[in-house]
Image (spheres, rainbow, N blue to C red):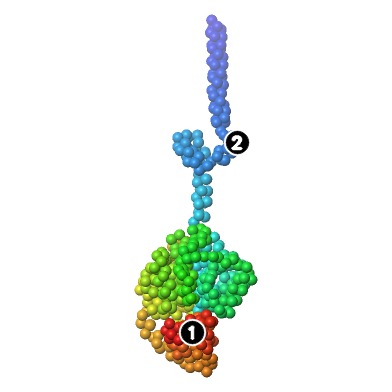
Amino acid sequence: MKKYLILLLAVAFTASMLFMGISCTEEVSPPEEVIKEKEEALPTENEIETNATEATPTETIEKEVEATTTPEEKPPQETEETPETTTTEEETPSTPTVPLKVHFIDVGQGDSTLIQTPEGKTILIDGGSKSSGPSLVSYLKSNDISKINIVIATHPHEDHIGGLISVLNNFTVDNIIDSGVSHTTKTYENYLTTIQSKNINFVNWSAGQSFDIGNNISIKILGPTSKSSDLNNSSIIILLSYNNSKFLFTGDAESEEETKIVSSGAVLKTNVLKVGHHGSSSSSYTNFLNSVSPTIAIITCGANNSYGHPHDTTLENLTNIGATIYRTDLTGTIIIESDGYNINVITGNPYTYVKAAAEETPQAEEPAVTETTEQQPSQTGDYAGSINSDVFHNPNCRYAKKILPENMTWFVSKEDAISKGYRACKVCKP
């Protein structure tokens, strides 16, 4: 009986052990199947490449929406963050990191302005006098200029085109915009000869015409509104626009042309004005300045020049409209930068006009009288003029007395002066 019971217990024990062993084996199988299912759920290398190739912005947006509802697609969601960053970096260059630069170059008693665009294009307006040519060339080279896309000669006076001859001989120039008004001086003849020898393209233009420079930058020719025998009033008047920033260059245009420009209905509102005719009282009349309403006014003239530029009337008019005045005769070259919306003066100090200073002006005329006395022995004509101007005077005219001996030229008659491109002084009326 006991043997039977022992045998029965042994059989039962063996059976239970076998049962437990089979159960353990069956419990191991399900995890292997789950791993295989997960491995089958992972994308293949081809699928990854396809997904990466097809990740267009539109699909990225769709995938972002799907990622919020499908947990398995969390890894692609991390991949999609990279294109968003890349897109932001690609958009950055659309806002230029390099600003528009405008250099009002100190060339003494003359005009010269260099414009550099964010894309590296260059425009040069006038070149000062012949004597300033070498220093102008050096300045351009110091700013890494090797090529000038457009040269603009506002009018043929020596203090505007003289230095351009050196520029044309030292740089590649693509285009010339010229006033089209001729002059009889040797300087003008040399200027034309140089352009022809270099085979530089003459650009045809008309008042109201615009030229697209690129990157939202343009130049528009506002004047002269009509042909004039007066060289100053034949000056090309240029509006430079860069998005919301505006610069106006008026050459030597006087009140006659300023009045015509205002009457033409042209939009003149400007941030920066290059003041006409070196700050002479013959320009910058009140109505014109009110129409332009500049926040910054740049006067280009030589230190202690014989013309007395800038005149007190101009300084007072500019002060009355609230413009901040900068002068090359006091601060040298003035550089202004703009991103198309903001304007910053990088080089140059503002000038404050004090009306009381005008009372001292008559005292400054005494040395000029002595200077005139010294000129009389060398007089070789009945009318006096300056090589830096196109106006002739009676010898006793107050403006003739201010002409330096080295700049003095004489004419035997009115006809002689007119034939050489000069016009009669409006003050002494010779």
Direction right: furthest residue = 197
Comparing 74 with 416, the one in front is 416
Q: Residue at x 58, y 74 (%)?
A: 191
Residue 367 visible? The answer is no
Q: Mark number for residue 392?
A: 1
Q: Secondary structure at mark 2?
A: helix
- Of residues 137 and 207, the one nearer the viewer is 207
Q: Foreground: 342 or 179?
A: 179
Judge by depth and name the residue closer to the eye, 412 or 315: 412
Q: Residues within 10 Å of mark 1 (few under 14, many from 20)?
A: many
Q: Is residue 408 above or below residue 208?
A: below
Which residue sits at x=60%, y=67%? 200
Q: Residue at x 43, y 75 (%)?
A: 254
Residue 426 % position (x, y):
43, 82
The image quadrant of residue 364 is bottom left
- Residue carrying label 2: 46
The mark found on residue 199 in the picture is none
- Percent across and percent down for residue 159 are 52, 77
The residue at the point 56 percent across, 21 percent down is: 25
Q: Secondary structure at mark 1?
A: strand
Foreground mark, 1 or 2, reads 1
Inter-mark Cα distance, 1 to 2 = 87 Å
Q: Is residue 192 found left or right of 74 in the rendered image?
A: right
Question: Is the residue marked by circle 2 packed among few (<14), some (14-19), or many (20+) residues within 10 Å?
Answer: few
Amino acid at pointer 1: Phe
Q: Give the vertical position of 61 relative to 141 (above or below).
A: above
**Quarter of the picture holding the C terminus:** bottom left
Res 49 visible: yes
Image coordinates for residue 116, horizontal then vertical, percent:
53, 65
Residue 41: x, y in percent? Answer: 55, 31
Q: Earlier in the sequence, mark 1 or mark 2?
A: 2
User: Could you tell me the amino acid type at mark 2?
Assistant: Asn
